[in-house]
Amino acid sequence: MLEDKKILCGASQYEQLFYFNPEFDSLPKAIKDELKILCVLYTEDVGGILRLEFDEEGNLNLVTESKEDDYFFDEIGSVLKIKQIQQEKRELLESLEMYYKVFFLQQEQE
C-alpha cells in the first residue's frame, strides 16, 4: 500500500529524528525548514510519528501513528493539531500538492 504513496517528510518522537526525502531536494530551503519545524513541533506537542505523504493522485496527507503501548500519545490532541496545521498552513500544503502534481505526476497546471 505504501508503494502508491511518496513520503515527503516526517518526524518521530520515539527516535527523536526528522526525515526529509532527498527526491524533494529541489524545494527551497525555506520550505524545507518550515516542514521540519511543522513536523518536529507536532511530535513534541502530541508525540508519536507524523508523516507528510503524497497519494497516487497527488494529494498531500498528514499521517499520524503511535506505538500501541504509548499511553502518552494524545489522540484527541493529534486530531486537533492536524486540523490546526491544515488551516494555518493551507497555502503551503496546497502549493506542495501543485508542485508534486506538476513535477512528479507530470500533470498540467489548472
Image (cartoon, rainbow, N blue to C red):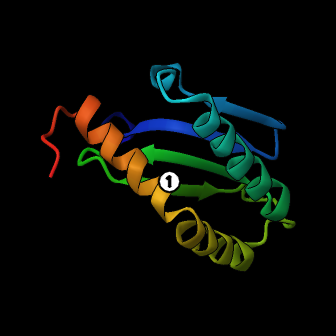
Count of numbered circles on the image = 1
Residue 70 coordinates in the image, percent (x, y): 82, 60
In percent of the image, x 34 and y 33: which residue is there? 3
In percent of the image, x 63 and y 56: which residue is there? 65
Q: Write down the quadrant of residue 6 in the picture.
A: top left
Residue 72 coordinates in the image, percent (x, y): 87, 66
Element class at badge 1: helix
Residue highlighted by disc 1 = 92
Front in this rendered view, residue 107 or 73: 107
Left or right: where 39 falls relative to 102: right
Front in this rendered view, residue 23 or 103: 103
Q: Is residue 50 above or below residue 71?
A: above
Q: Is residue 104 visible?
A: no
Crowding near the residue tagged with mark 1, few <14, some 14–19, many ≥20 C-alpha atoms within 10 Å:
some
Quadrant holding the N terminus:
top left
Front in this rendered view, residue 39 or 51: 39
In percent of the image, x 14 and y 53: which residue is there? 110
Q: Write down the quadrant of residue 69 in the picture.
A: bottom right
Q: Is residue 30 visible?
A: yes
Left or right: where 50 falls relative to 41: left
Q: Amino acid at mark 1?
A: Leu
Q: Write down the quadrant of residue 33 in the picture.
A: top right
In percent of the image, x 63 and y 36: which residue is there? 30
Residue 36 coordinates in the image, percent (x, y): 70, 41
Left or right: where 94 falls relative to 17: left
